[in-house]
Image (spheres, helix red, strand yellow):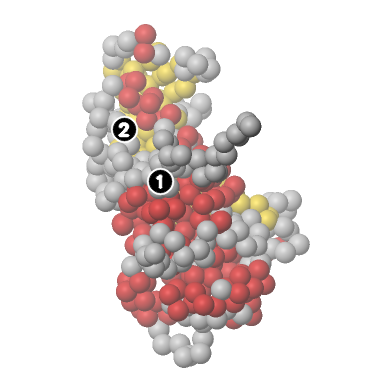
Amino acid sequence: MAYHDSVLSQVLKLLPRHEFERQANRDDGKRRSDAMTRWSQFVALTIGQLGGRSSLRDIEATVNSQGHHRYHLGSQSISKSALGRANERLDYRFYAGVFQTLYQRCTGDVRSHGFRFRNKLFSLDASLIEVSMKIFPWADYNGQKVAFKLHVGLDHDGLIPAFADLTKAKVADMTQARLMRFPPGSVLVFDKGYSCYRWHNSLTEEGIFFVTRLRRNALYRVVERRSINPDSGVTSDQVIEFTATRKDGDPLAPVRRVGYRDPETGKHYVFITNQFNWSAKTIADIYKERWEVELFFKWIKQNLKIKAFLGTSENAVMTQIMAALCVYLLLAYLKFKSKLGKSLQQIIRLLQLNLFARRSLLALLHPPDTDGLPPPQLSLGLVRN
């Protein structure tokens, strides 16, 4: 029988260890020889995510009960106090760098977004992660709710997060959007929470396209009307200029206004974009794809440990969530490389049941076809005397 490392060890090998250690040395500098290493912290947090562990004590018991696997994992023994200190003190932004490393690995094996154009397509959105007011009073949102805000730029090539950051809930969506940098020619789709016409203008100057919805109170004048195909659901296709007085006095570039009625729901939507060449129906279809980022938030809240936290400080919370997003990219990379037809939810369930099993990861994800094979149960023939 062929020898195999544990399934967990094979999953972690998808992350380049030399790059991980290089970044740890650069970000953390020289540390005590007996301190918990970054790699041991990440192994423990990954076990918490994939193993469904909800506390420091659970992770400690799991890791230390599998001591014979630590050599292949390259991990130290884990105590809940050491892991708690590491989560409190080691800067969470380290995992933002690990996140980008994993994202770059994923991009070479992902499927296209499905549109005819070759431009990169990103959806921007943010979602609140509500927590207990008694445990996290420093994260007060409005006096009645305590929450963090996860900001994501979802890459539609593979439906994986390309940008992610965690802030307090009071931080505006636009504040984080301005910090994101997208390659020229990208297409951004976002809702009215990112309705800042000056920012839209700067995207146009950078050669980036956007699709969003028009505010109801927007002041504008129509400078051009275009022909439409009513059978496509498009109700209007215009070029407009905003007429509201700007504080800085600088004019805004004209934008395209597209009206669309959804044939399934009957609802009418009005979009604006700085892309003037694609069909109006394509603009409406692009905005419809924004729903994928909502599904992403729903998935991670249901399947990753980002609601029960291992620490109470801001750094500990952000460490756990950023590490969870790194685990998400590991699962996505595994799915892309193995060309699996399984969903990420099916993959995470398989891994949870076999985390420390010594078997081939690919054989676990691609079980042999048993169609046509005789049943394993012995057949007994009855003989009549």
Residue 183 image point, x, y percent: 27, 49
Q: Please say whether residue 363 is visible from this viewpoint.
A: yes
Q: Residue at x 31, y 57 (%)?
A: 105
Closer to the camera, 373 or 290?
373
Closer to the camera, 373 or 61?
373
Q: Which disc, if any, is residue 187?
A: none
Q: Residue at x 42, y 36 (%)?
A: 371
Which quadrant of the figure has residue 64?
A: bottom right
Closer to the camera, 385 or 35?
385
Residue 106 image point, x, y percent: 33, 53
Residue 3 image point, x, y percent: 39, 68
Q: Quadrant of the N terminus?
A: bottom left
Task: Please say if 27 is above or below 112.
Answer: below
Q: Residue at x 40, y 59 (%)?
A: 360
Q: Residue at x 25, y 39 (%)?
A: 119
Of label 2 and label 1, which has the lower sequence position? 2
The three-letter amino acid code for the residue at tag 1 is Pro
* Circle 2/circle 1 CB separation < 8 Å: no
Residue that mark 1 sits on = 368
Residue that mark 2 sits on = 114
Task: Please identify, in this view, whether the residue under mark 2 or under mark 1 is nearer the observer.
Answer: 1
Give neighbour class at mark 2: few <14, some 14-19, many 20+ (Cα, 10 Å). Answer: few
Residue 385 image point, x, y percent: 63, 32
In three-dimensional space, the C-alpha distance between marks 2 and 1, rounded to whole angstroms, equals 31 Å
Dot 1 falls on a residue whose secondary structure is loop
Task: Please say if 114 is above or below 25.
Answer: above
Give neighbour class at mark 1: few <14, some 14-19, many 20+ (Cα, 10 Å). Answer: few
